[in-house]
Image: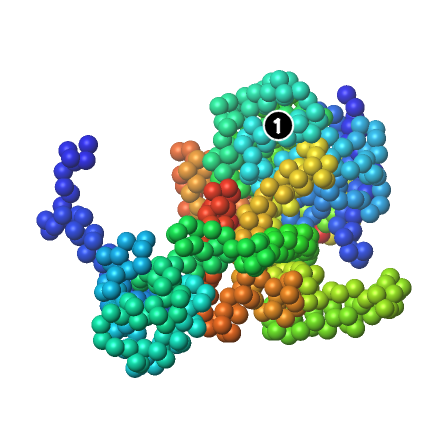
């Protein structure tokens, strides 16, 4: 497997000559990998995708596809499949003609093309829809056609630009699994752009979190969630409780952070020495009520709000001056004594409290 | 099924359908009142004039009313030999009445339209008929002029008996009904209307084509440029729209005349000699240039409104799937603009086919259209019925084009905005 199947090498992109939308991007994508570019809008992720597809040119730097520099290759010669945000199905062509388009321009004989189209349609479970017009299909079906069309000419690389953004929640979730399964079964390299973190976490092998034109972190979904390397990633991915404070001591892989007259033991990730300002990030499910004595952080706070969520209850607690501290408590009979206004004890391991940049 | 379904009643026992109608009635009345002014406006400004035009174009009551007795007596006449004495007597009585009312001149004009040679013999008849004796009018009238003894002239009178006629329409096609009632074309050197019809179609077709060729890139640019530039360009497209048609045509006259700006420029760069300045006005060229410029916005706007709705990602999709820019344009973009092309072409063609002021000013003799001929008959010859007939022929031509368009492209495929 080619470790550098797609390679962004020091890519800059500016639209107006004043601000950089993409800054010094360095990104390698392995062959057969499903990589998601995740970030808020305006973070440069779509621009990166467009540069890869050939609809934008890098202001500086070079992009390599399978070892070839592609900046000077026009989009139609790159052989990259693409799924667009609003599907971009050709509305005046039937599903069959839509799928036949990439094959026809490649002058593939009709019987061979028909086989490929059948295969692609069955891949997205749309056999029998070949003669429909896109307007006669539901949003989910159109999306499947768009996916099938991007794969029908056997590209090595498929780009997907927020393809599920227009679908409703249930459909989006089932399409996520479907796209993931298609990726697993044919082993094509996929670069996927989304601003929906749960989508990214569900589907990807690796996720590149974009912010401010830079990749903040590139790692697997679990690592991204469990071990964010900076405050932006910690807050962007999943729910997060934070404490702002100052490092008062650092030793033996742990640090003490002064927060609201007390000290929290934390895992020093991006702090190096005493006196540095920091932000501690703690996932809600890592803090427990009724903590065991083994936990090295035990504090008490007052319950401000209780929100029932069916399978779990969310409890907002005023803890160490943070009025927005969230706890997720599974709904079991043991936890029925959670009442508004009560003081409770909360504990967590210092390893889960990551001391990151203060931002 | 429906006969088996029981009538559904509301809770007070009224059938649901009745109840629904009652509830909807107020809304229906309101809706009608809202459209009533428009309906009234359309009836007054469109239905009435068109109806009046239709009547006028086939109206031939004048002669019928002037010679009531004659036509009654002629009902028996077989039209082969000279008519009997009753016809001559009836004609004499009708004619005397006209002379008393001083209307015999109109009769002579009308009859002369049907057959040349009536003018002089009616004048003569008026003089002589003062001294006619009672009885045997046939002999006396025939003695006035030998043409009165010619059966062809009596046949010509009889042809004017019906109160309605299609002869104006025939005339519009350079045809007429000859003595034996056959429809034939006029001599070749007198076929002016056919030439005009063909020229009108030709000019309308080419103006539409030129408009399309020029408007397509403009509309595409308008639809794809960033807002601040496209607004400026839009104003450039619309500015001529806000300028008086006459002013625009007049400025073309300044530009195109032989001592005009364009010719001066050609001479200046040495493209043409000073003594061989090309004529660009008072001919077809002038009509083409000015009409294309004037009708351009009617092509740009429908095209723009359609192109605006075409997502740029479609072209991108076409390219990313391997189509060259040309293939992507031709297979993806172009077919999607067809509703706009249809609307723009139909609009331009229909407007061009009835264009009047511009060809009148810059068209000269070889660049005028059928509308100019209609206007000529409205204003100069005062043959309103002929003008109406040609107007209706133009209208039906437009309707035929509309029908053809609907057959070929489908009117649902049109998009005006």
- Residue B386 point in image, percent of width and height: 45, 64
Residue A73 on image: x %, y %: 80, 36
Which residue of the protein is positioned furthest toward the left in this rendering? B13
Residue B279 makes an appearance in the image: yes
- A307 or B365, nearer to the observer: B365
Residue at figure coordinates x 21%, y 52% from the top left = B20
User: Which residue is more in the foreground, B13 or B349?
Assistant: B349
Chain under callout 1: A
Question: Vertical placement of A100 versus B178: above or below?
Answer: above
Look at the numbered disc 1 and give the secondary structure of its residue.
helix
Residue in view at x 58 percent, y 43 percent? B336
Q: How is the image coloured?
A: rainbow
- Relative horizontal placement of residue A177, taking residue B42 as reference (left or right): right
**With respect to residue A214, does B103 lie above or below?**
below
Report the residue at 45% width, 65% height from top. B116
Q: Position of residue B391 (x, y in %)?
A: 46, 62
Give B195 or A305, whichever is nearer the viewer. B195
Image quarter in which the N terminus of chain A is found: top right
Q: Is residue A169 above or below residue B64?
A: above
Q: Give neighbour class at mark 1: few <14, some 14-19, many 20+ (Cα, 10 Å).
A: many
Q: For residue A184, which quarter of the picture?
A: top right
Residue B356 position in % (x across, y down): 56, 66
**Quarter assignment of residue B118:** bottom left
> Camera-side residue: B160 or B376?
B160
Q: Which residue is mark 1?
A: A100
Picture residue at 58% right of the left edge, 37% below the top: A89
The vertical placement of B59 against A60, above or below, is: below
């Amino acid at each position: 497997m080619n470790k550098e199947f797609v390679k962004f090498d020091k890519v800059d992109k500016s639209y107006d000559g004043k601000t950089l939308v993409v800054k010094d991007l360095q990104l390698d994508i392995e062959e057969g990998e499903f990589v998601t570019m995740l970030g808020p809008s305006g973070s440069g992720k779509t621009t990166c995708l467009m540069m890869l597809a050939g609809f934008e040119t890098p202001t500086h730097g070079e992009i390599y596809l399978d070892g070839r520099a592609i900046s000077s290759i026009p989009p139609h010669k790159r052989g990259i499949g693409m799924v667009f945000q609003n599907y971009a199905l050709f509305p005046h062509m039937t599903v069959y003609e839509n799928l036949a388009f990439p094959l026809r321009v490649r002058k593939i004989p009709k019987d061979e093309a028909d086989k490929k189209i059948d295969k692609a349609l069955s891949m997205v479970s749309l056999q029998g829809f070949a003669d429909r017009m896109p307007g006669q299909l539901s949003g989910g079906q159109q999306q499947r056609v768009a996916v099938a069309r991007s794969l029908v000419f056997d590209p090595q690389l498929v780009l997907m630009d927020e393809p599920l953004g227009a679908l409703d929640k249930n459909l989006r979730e089932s399409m996520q699994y479907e796209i993931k399964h298609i990726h697993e079964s044919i082993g094509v390299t996929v670069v996927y752009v989304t601003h929906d973190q749960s989508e990214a976490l569900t589907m990807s092998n690796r996720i590149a979190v974009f912010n401010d034109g830079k990749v903040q972190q590139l790692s697997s979904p679990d690592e991204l969630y469990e071990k964010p390397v900076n405050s932006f990633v910690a807050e962007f991915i999943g729910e997060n409780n934070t404490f702002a404070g100052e490092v008062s001591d650092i030793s033996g892989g742990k640090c003490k952070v002064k927060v609201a007259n007390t000290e929290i033991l934390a895992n020093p990730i991006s702090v190096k020495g005493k006196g540095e300002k920091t932000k501690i990030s703690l996932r809600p499910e890592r803090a427990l009520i009724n903590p065991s004595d083994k936990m090295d952080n035990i504090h008490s706070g007052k319950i401000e709000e209780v929100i029932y969520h069916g399978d779990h209850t969310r409890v907002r607690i005023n803890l160490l001056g943070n009025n927005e501290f969230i706890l997720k408590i599974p709904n079991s009979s043991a936890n029925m004594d959670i009442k508004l206004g009560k003081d409770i004890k909360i504990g967590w391991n210092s390893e889960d409290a990551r001391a990151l940049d203060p931002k | 099924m429906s006969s088996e379904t029981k009538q559904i009643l509301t809770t007070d026992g009224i059938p649901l359908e009745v109840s629904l109608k009652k509830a909807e009635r107020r809304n229906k009345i309101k809706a009608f009142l809202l459209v009533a002014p428009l309906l009234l406006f359309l009836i007054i400004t469109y239905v009435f004039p068109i109806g009046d035009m239709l009547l006028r174009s086939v109206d031939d009551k004048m002669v019928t009313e002037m010679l009531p007795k004659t036509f009654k007596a002629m009902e028996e006449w077989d039209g082969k030999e000279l008519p009997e004495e009753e016809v001559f007597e009836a004609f004499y009585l009708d004619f005397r009445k006209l002379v008393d009312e001083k209307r015999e001149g109109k009769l002579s004009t009308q009859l002369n339209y049907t057959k040349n040679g009536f003018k002089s013999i009616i004048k003569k008849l008026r003089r002589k008929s003062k001294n006619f004796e009672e009885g045997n009018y046939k002999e006396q009238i025939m003695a006035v002029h030998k043409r009165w003894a010619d059966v062809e002239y009596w046949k010509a009178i009889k042809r004017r008996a019906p109160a309605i006629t299609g002869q104006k329409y025939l005339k519009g096609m350079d045809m007429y009904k000859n003595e034996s009632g056959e429809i034939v074309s006029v001599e070749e050197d007198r076929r002016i209307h056919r030439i005009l019809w063909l020229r009108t179609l030709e000019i309308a077709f080419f103006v539409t084509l030129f408009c399309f060729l020029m408007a397509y890139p403009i509309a595409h640019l308008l639809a794809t440029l960033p807002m601040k530039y496209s607004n400026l360009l839009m104003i450039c497209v619309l500015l001529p729209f806000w300028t008086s048609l006459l002013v625009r045509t007049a400025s073309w006259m300044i530009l195109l005349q032989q001592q005009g700006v364009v010719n001066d420029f050609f001479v200046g760069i040495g493209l043409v000699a000073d003594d061989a300045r090309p004529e660009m006005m008072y001919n077809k060229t002038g009509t083409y240039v000015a009409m294309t410029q004037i009708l351009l916005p009617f092509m740009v706007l429908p095209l723009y409104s359609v192109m605006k709705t075409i997502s740029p990602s479609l072209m991108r999709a076409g390219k990313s799937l391997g189509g060259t820019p040309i293939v992507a344009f031709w297979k993806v973009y172009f077919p999607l603009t067809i509703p706009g092309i249809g609307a723009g072409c139909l609009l331009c063609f229909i407007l061009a086919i009835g264009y009047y002021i511009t060809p009148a000013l810059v068209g000269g003799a070889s660049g005028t259209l059928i509308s100019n001929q209609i206007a000529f008959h409205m204003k100069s010859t005062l043959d309103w019925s002929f003008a109406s007939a040609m107007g209706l022929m133009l209208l039906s031509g437009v309707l035929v084009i509309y029908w053809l368009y609907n057959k070929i492209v489908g009117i649902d495929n049109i998009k005006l905005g």
